[in-house]
Amino acid sequence: MQLSAETSRGIEYLKGIVESGRTLRLSDPVRLNESNAYVLAIVGFGKQWDICLTREQLDDLPGTKEYRDSALALTRALDLRFRNLDPNLFMTYSGRLLKIVPRWPL
């Protein structure tokens, strides 16, 4: 798969954010069919979280504060969630355990 220089730069920037904590790793991007969307996997502690980003989002990531902040927040959350038995398990205020598995596309 041939990526543009701008998209490659965005992926490397995202990889730097994800792998800055030394416990999570970012996979190589996989292009979805003939679209401009890529699936990347964030892996750590034997768990995986798939994320789908468009080429435009990846291209704009290094220069867009909102995208950078969002990537950093996701990485911090996943680093904590992956330490759980299942990153998709959530405890409600009432003590009920919920399993929420987000899927794309919605």
Image (cartoon, rainbow, N blue to C red):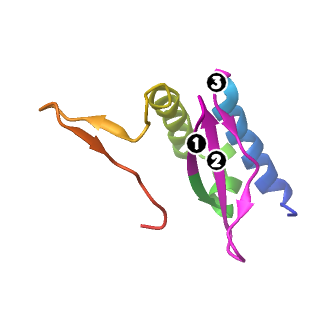
Tell me which label, 2 or 1, sits earlier in the chain. Answer: 2
Spatial distance from mark 2 to mark 1, Cα to Cα?
Answer: 6 Å
Q: Tell me if label 2 and label 1 are in contact, CB under 8 Å.
A: yes
Among the 4 quarters of the image, the one containing residue 6: bottom right
Q: Which residues are magenta?
A: 21-50
Left or right: where 73 falls relative to 52 = left
Residue 106 in percent (x, y) is at: 41, 67
Residue pictured at 62% horizontal, 41% vertical: 42
Q: Is residue 33 above or below residue 82?
A: below
Q: Earlier in the sequence, mark 3 or mark 2?
A: 3
Q: Is residue 41 left or right of residue 3?
A: left
1 and 3 marks in contact (CB < 8 Å)? no
| Disc 2 versus disc 1: nearer the observer | 1
Left or right of 21, for residue 28: right
Toward the top, the furthest residue is 22
Give amino acid for label 1: Gln
- For label 3, the SS is loop
Instruction: Look at mark 1 in the image and give the residue it sits on.
Output: 48
Q: Which residue is mark 2?
A: 41
The amino acid type found where label 3 is placed reads Thr
Q: Which mark is residue 23?
A: 3
Q: Earlier in the sequence, mark 1 or mark 3?
A: 3
Disc 2 residue crowd, few under 14, some 14–19, many 20+, Cα 10 Å: some
Image point 83% across, 60% down: which residue? 3
Q: Could you tell me residue 97's position as x and y percent?
A: 24, 37
Residue at mark 3 to residue at mark 2: CA–CA distance: 14 Å
Q: Is residue 54 magenta?
A: no
